[in-house]
Image (cartoon, grey):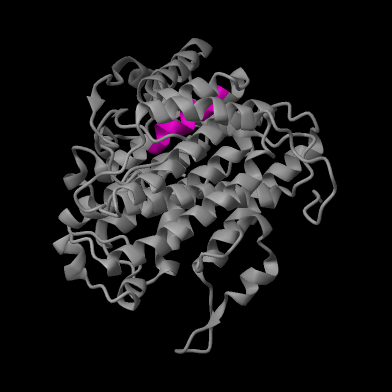
Amino acid sequence: MSAALLWVVSPTSEVSNGTAFMDSTREGNRILDSFKSISGRKNSIFKGQKNRRSFSSTNANLSFSRFRRLSVISSAVASPSAGEITLSSEQKVYDVVLKQAALVKRQLKSNENLELEVKPDIVVPGSLSLLNEAYDRCREVCAEYAKTFYLGTLLMTPERRRAIWAIYVWCRRTDELVDGPNASHITPMALDRWEARLEDIFRGRPFDMLDAALSDTVSRFPVDIQPFRDMIEGMRMDLWKSRYKNFDELYLYCYYVAGTVGLMSVPIMGIAPESQATTESVYNSALALGLANQLTNILRDVGEDARRGRIYLPQDELAQAGLSEEDIFAGKVTDKWRNFMKKQIKRARKFFDDAENGVTELSSASRWPVWASLLLYRQILDEIEANDYNNFTRRAYVSKPKKILALPMAYAKSLVPPSSKSSPLVKA
């Protein structure tokens, strides 16, 4: 499992202070000492594993760009035990989407030019020079381990690129808790402490230099804490869950570890002032891209996960295809497996299609890195097909020449402005 950051090209390793947070205290003036002692060692996370954050419906035909409250309500089902209404994963996630979109809409109404305003009730400790150093450290991590995406961030305004770097680093550090070299020592209690540290970040009380960058970021943009909490919840899930009985369960996991990044990032990326799309539809597209990326990771890494005793595939759909866990562990490509994979790939591509609807609605300086991520990640599905669906012993990857060819295509797509025509999705 790893975090596929935002609408980002997934990287391969990270700089962090390991499990130091497990022994940390939150006493006064700690940030100044942390600035002096912050570790610069490189830990090997994001080892090309799950990238399970990275950027992310109970059926393949659901279009998030046209998602309506009506469809959410219809997904609620009655609990057979007490006659209660049980919400589907889509409903739970959509409620979060509505909250995030509301934050951005309030800022849009208060400032049509999307100028950034610092919230006066959050003050980041430390001097300006220390804060600049914190952002610079985040920049170094992004530049070294997500080169393609980093180049795209340079097209953004200085405030936005710094904020994206800060979010990127936090997601990677969070992912390391369950995927890094110290993952075997991580317990639910340790994740509770990490979440308490997150609460401190949002209160303007960062523990170390990298936390300080994120604390400053969330004070400047309408970023809500819930997607960050949800990502940590995805970490908790990975500590105890290795099977998913249906796509509804898998959907929620994909949201936790990937869709959350899209929700974190939309306020930073910004929506084009001329866009006529609803804020909710843009968030839904970000969510769809996270789901698409995560499903792609899952399909790419079936063999690798199986060797770790994990199966991130809907159990009911495997059974319908005439496949069992033993077939997955045996790792044989059969006609049944090919047919199953074709349906899974079709679903992932549908999410990519839905994601495209929102990319053009982003601010002009943010579109290129997002398009690059989408086009490059989508090609992994093509490579799985080219490998005759052998994702047991062959790892699908996009070659460097193909990556290079995708970049000018992504740039060309980024130049297409949002549609100025009115539609049923006109902003409220």
**Residue drawn 78% across the image and 34% down it:** 273
Where 265 falls versus 324 (above or below)? above
Find out whether residue 168 is within the magenta segment: yes
In the rendered image of this protein, does residue 346 appear above or below residue 360?
below
| 178 horizontally vs 219: left or right | left
Identify the residue at horizontal 25%, vertical 53% (top origin): 390
The reply, left or right, for residue 298 in relation to residue 403 is left
Q: Position of residue 151 (x, y in %)?
A: 49, 20
Q: Kindly identify the residue that appears in the image at 17 percent across and 46 percent down.
A: 184
What residue appears at the point 40 percent right and 48 percent down from the top-left corner?
381
User: Which residue is farthest right?
Assistant: 422
Q: Quadrant of residue 110?
A: top right
Q: Main secondary structure of the magenta part?
A: helix
Q: Which residues are magenta?
A: 161-171
- Rendering coords of residue 5 (x, y %): 44, 38
Quadrant in which residue 323 is drawn: bottom left
In the rendered image, residue 15 lying in the magenta stretch gets the answer: no
Q: Give coordinates of residue 310: x percent, y percent.
A: 23, 59
Q: Can see residue 233? A: yes
Residue 123 in sight in this render: no
Residue 62: percent from the left, percent from the top?
A: 58, 64
Number of marks: 0
- Residue 274 horizontal side relative to residue 397, left or right: right
Q: Is residue 113 above or below residue 263?
A: above
